[in-house]
Amino acid sequence: MRALSVRGARQRCDPCREWFDRPMTQRIEDHAIIGDCHTAALVDRSGTIDWACLPRFDSPSTFAALLGDEHDGHWTLRPTDQDATAVRRYDEDTLVLTTIWTTATGVVEVTDFMPVGAHRASIVRRVRGLRGEVEVRQAIRIRFDYARALPWVRQVGDDDGPALVATAGPGSVIVTGIRFHADDHRHVATRTVHDGDVLDTVLTWYPSHREPPEPVDVDDALASTRRWWRDWAGSARVDGRYADATRRSLLFLRAMTHAETGGVVAAATTSLPEDPGGERNWDYRYVWLRDASLALASMIAHGYRDEAKHWRGWLLRAIAGDPADVQIMYGIAGERELPEWELDHLAGYADSKPVRVGNGAYTQYQGDVFGEVLAALHDARELGVEENADSWALQRALLGYVEEHWKEPDNGIWEMRGPRRDFTHSRAMVWAAFDRGVAAVEEFGLEGPADRWRQLRDAVRAEIDEHGWNAERGSFRQHYDTDEVDASLLVLPQIGFCRADDPRMLGTVAAIEQDLRVGDDGLVLRYRTTSGFDGLSGSEHPFLACSFWLVEQYAASGRIEDAEKLMDVLVGYANDVGMLSEEIDVATGHHIGNTPQALSHLTLVSAADAIARARGAAAGHRTRTPQHDGSTHSWTGEGGRAGVPA
């Protein structure tokens, strides 16, 4: 693959590889995530942790070299032999990362993980000698507050229990297990590891006003962390051709679900660019109602009832109050203020500025989120999550708000920063909101004005049929004032608005194939940015979630071979440990955008389920594999359900 084109001092030219060969400038796909379900760190192929926010996903960074260089914080652990080669993998069904380093003198194993269930956020790096002897070097540069705070660092303990303590403002970290020495505002340590040796180094975050915590028992922490992940993964119902990719995606989704609050962050990173060198750089360390709702659907589809209950609790707390105040996204604990600001001192990944913290889109109105939320809560009911008076009262209040405001234009699923529009996808999700309200009354015996909701559902459908349909082209349109198409239209069959083989849907797919598929592999853009109506300069690359939606559409409409062909391409873009970012540069194969991207992984799960469902149907097998929205219903596509298949 060719390297990304970057700007400024980091510009590279063939055949030299000065930018990507430097340990601190790894490609996005070179990273693997480790996490404790409170936060996460990214480890690259060179053995460097170049992104970690402690103790929460959205905390200020402790290591931020990913968005700058080594001076912005990193922790590198690798052999001193520059010709050493590495092969890495996750321990089966865990987020415990194992890397085997081979040198001219020996072989060592490095195990990186974050203990699950610990009282403090910790990163553990264990080196074990496998053969011969290997000189291993560690270099750690701690920088709090997005590299704006140079900490006070001091050595404590003795040779039997050496420790490094770094403090700046409210946070401290203690690094135990090996004695470091200062070297130009960083700390380094070199040890020779022989066959059978074990060397543990542990970094633990704690509030600076408290005493340092007790050292982590690495043996116990490693065993319990492996056991926790395997127990969780072992309860998944996964089969079919793409079972491995599905299981790994579910693990990533669980890793991005906060253990205490239940909030599912959209990604572990901020400001990894959609257009390297451009301005399309956003902070994704928050909980989008849409993404979290779809993640819930993926969990429900594979039997995770506890996660469904946990997420519903987060949702009900976050949106409690006046429905008029519902936002498209919240903080991990339901925080409502997510002001967007820029970190001018960070160069940005591939010199992509600005680097942003917060996300100004939280103030936008996106009408589709009401449908996403109500569909997800309906899925939870179908799974058997018991409804209570408070949760249904809140859903009724949301529906009451939608009744009053459903005709208002919005910013759409893609958070357009231009003027509001009447987006067809948003209106279809409003249709879904009323549809699920009717189903709650008719199928679950809950109280509500089902007749009124049914009338409104039919009115929304009539409006879409009149204004969201482009008869001349034979396709649905992106919004009512354009003839452009949008990949979000692929969701219409998934929510039951129409059948996948409806002629209108087939015409829409043909238009999407013509306008939005790019590259030899035919990956899908969200929409054409050339019109400029999204309020941003520059362009973007194919959006993985949209391509997975096309897979699902192919499978559901009988194009199974096309579905599997595209699915194979998409799964093939995952990196060596199965991670996907937001987009793919089809010219180079490089990952683009924040990573790991929850929306990419949850749509992978849904696409894999759709193929398994289609293969089962083709073989004459009945299946109750949930649809994208978690429903086992077969849809009439005309405003109601045909009933549950036997």
Image: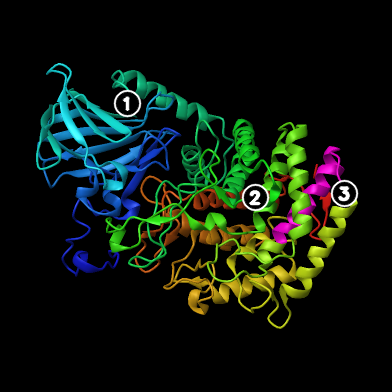
Left or right, 140 with respect to 489, comes to: left
Q: Given the current orientation, which residue lies at the most extreme bottom position?
A: 472
What residue is shown with label 2? Answer: 325
Pick the residue in front: 240 or 138.
138
What residue is shown with label 3? Answer: 450
Amino acid under disc 3: Ala
Q: Position of residue 639 (x, y in %)?
A: 82, 58
Q: Quadrant of the C terminus?
A: top right
Q: Position of residue 160 (x, y in %)?
A: 15, 16
Residue at figure coordinates x 40%, y 56% from the top left: 341
Pick the residue in front: 535 or 382.
535
Q: Main secondary structure of the magenta part?
A: helix
Amino acid under disc 2: Asp
Residue at figure coordinates x 19%, y 56% from the top left: 21
Marks 1 and 3 in Cβ contact (< 8 Å): no
Q: CA distance from mark 3 to mark 2?
A: 25 Å
Residue at figure coordinates x 31%, y 43% from the top left: 145
Give neighbour class at mark 2: few <14, some 14-19, many 20+ (Cα, 10 Å).
few
Task: Give the magenta range.
Answer: 428-449
Amino acid under disc 1: His
What residue is shown with label 1? Answer: 209
Choose top left, top right, bottom left or bottom right for residue 461: bottom right
Give neighbour class at mark 3: few <14, some 14-19, many 20+ (Cα, 10 Å).
some
Mark 3 or 2: the one toward you? 2
